[in-house]
Each structure stands twice: as structure tokens, then as C-alpha cells.
Image (spheres, rainbow, N blue to C red):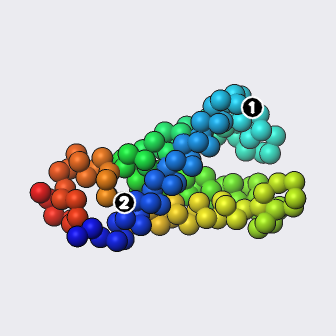
Amino acid sequence: MINKNEVGALILRLTLGLLFFIHGLVKFQDGIGNTVGWFNSIGIPGFLGYVVPFVELVGGIALIIGIGTRLVSTFIAIIMIGAIFKVKLAIGLLGNGQMAGYELDLAFLAIAIYLAINGSKLLSTYQIFLNKDRYSNKTA
């Protein structure tokens, strides 16, 4: 029998992975230099304009295939904390009509924290490489 908590974690892992992959991809498609410039303009060191999109893109893929879920989710949580406090907090929870607030960032943060604490093994590469039984914590 499939553990319903693992099914829920899988849904969260795939959703967070897909959304962060897309966020990272857009930053690269729009020109990473634009991201670096924007980071500098809001007082964030420019080199993080390379790091954040890389974590989003590669981390998103890692989450989708189930590699390093806890580590990647920790990095995403750190990014979300930075986004909330450096950019979105002053705008407010629901935004100001011109820019979205931090409600979505807060949801991403909650998902990332959940995955950082609990992980997600169902349908993960981790499960395949370690030859784990799909539905339990026992080795096959």
C-alpha cells in the first residue's frame, strides 16, 4: 500500500520543482545579466544573480527527478526568505496593484520547509539508486 504522506510529498516536490525550473529558465532566457543588474539595483550582491537562477533551474530539475530533495529545498527556502524580506515585505502580503505581494513566496517557503524536513522518496531517483522498496523504508 502506498503511504499517503509520500503521495502528498511527491505532489509538493513535483510542483515546487516544476515552478522553480520555470522561474530559473525564464531568468536565463531573459538574459542573466538583467537578473544580475536587478539584484545590484536592489542592494543584493550581483553574483547572487547567477547563483539564484542556477539553484532555481538545476534545483527544479533535481526536485522533479528526486535527487537531493532536502538540500535543494533548503536552498529554495533560503531564496524565499531573501525574496520575502528584501523585495516583497514592503509591498505587503497581497501586493499593491502593480506588484504581487509575498503570498506566493510564503507558500513556496512552506513547501520548501516541509520538503527540507521530510524529504520525498516516492518515484525519486534516490529510491532507484539505493534500491529502496517503493512503499516502505526497507531495502528491497
Image coordinates of residue 117 in percent, x first then y, are 42, 66
- Residue sitting at the far front: 1
Identify the amino acid type marked 1: Asn
Residue 85 - label: none
Q: Which secondary structure lies at badge 2? A: loop
What residue sits 49% from the left and 49% below the top? 17
- Residue 7 higher or lower than 76, as above or below: below
What residue sits 41% from the left and 67% below the top? 8
Dot 2 crowding, Cα within 10 Å, few <14, some 14–19, many 20+: many
Give the labeled residue for mark 1: 34
**From the image, which quarter does the C terminus lie in?**
bottom left
Residue 120 - label: 2
Discs 2/1, front: 2
Dots 2 and 1: beta carbons under 8 Å?
A: no
On the picture, is 57 further left or further right than 48?
A: left
On the picture, is 41 further left or further right than 66?
A: right
Q: Quadrant of residue 97?
A: bottom right
Image coordinates of residue 70 in percent, x first then y, are 41, 56
